């Protein structure tokens, strides 16, 4: 058996939780959480950590060199660097509206990369 430490960000308390992991890699016990939502958060964070991907993308024919973008849903934390490498290879041209899909289904995650600002020229 092993132990993992996870800081819960499910609420403002920021509980420091300890997860006891059994031989099969499953969570056997959670300690340190002050609410039931915290327990659920840290178990999911251990099993399947996801994050919203945020970045910028190069622009062409615009006075702004970069356009801020993000994923419209969280993706696996382990895919963030690969997503950034994929975005480096792309450029966008105006006009682009906030919320417009820039790159659909990045890395087959089901998440689209969308613009978080307008790019008019």
Image (cartoon, rainbow, N blue to C red):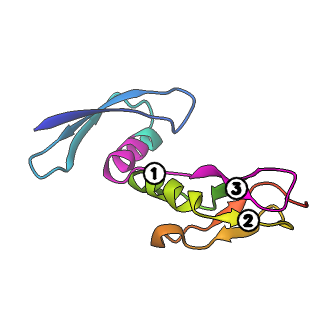
Residue 26 on the magenta span: no
In the image: residue 64, left or right of residue 43: right
Q: Label 3, on which residue?
A: 58
Q: Looking at the image, which residue sits at the far right?
A: 121
In what element is the residue under mark 3?
Answer: strand
At label 1, counting other C-alpha atoms closer than 10 Å, the crowd grade (few under 14, some 14-19, many 20 or more) is few
Secondary structure of the residue carrying numbered label 1? helix
Q: Is residue 98 above or below residue 31?
A: below
x and y, in percent, of residue 33 in the image: 39, 31
Which is in the foreground here, disc 1 or disc 3?
Answer: 3
Q: Position of residue 1 (x, y in %)?
A: 10, 38
**Mark 1 = which residue?**
81
* Residue 34 or residue 1, whichever sits in front: 1
* Residue assigned mark 2: 92
Q: Is residue 76 visible?
A: no
Counting other residues with Cα less than 10 Å from the Cα at mark 3, is it few (<14), some (14-19), or many (20 or more)?
some
Viewer-nearest residue: 56 or 40: 56
- x and y percent of residue 10 in the render? 51, 39
Q: Nearer the viewer, residue 119 or 89?
A: 89
The residue shown at (79%, 67%) is 93
């Amino acid at each position: 058996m092993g132990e993992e430490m996870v800081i819960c960000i499910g609420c403002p308390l920021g509980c420091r939780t300890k997860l006891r992991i059994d031989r099969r890699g499953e969570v056997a016990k959670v300690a340190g959480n002050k609410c039931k939502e915290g327990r659920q958060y840290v178990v999911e964070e251990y099993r399947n950590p996801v994050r919203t991907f945020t970045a910028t993308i190069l622009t062409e024919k615009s006075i702004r060199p970069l356009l801020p973008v993000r994923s419209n849903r969280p993706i696996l934390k382990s895919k963030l660097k690969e997503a950034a490498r994929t975005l480096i290879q792309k450029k966008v041209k105006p006009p682009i509206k906030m919320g417009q899909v820039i790159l659909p289904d990045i890395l087959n995650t089901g998440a689209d990369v969308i613009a978080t600002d307008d790019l008019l020229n």
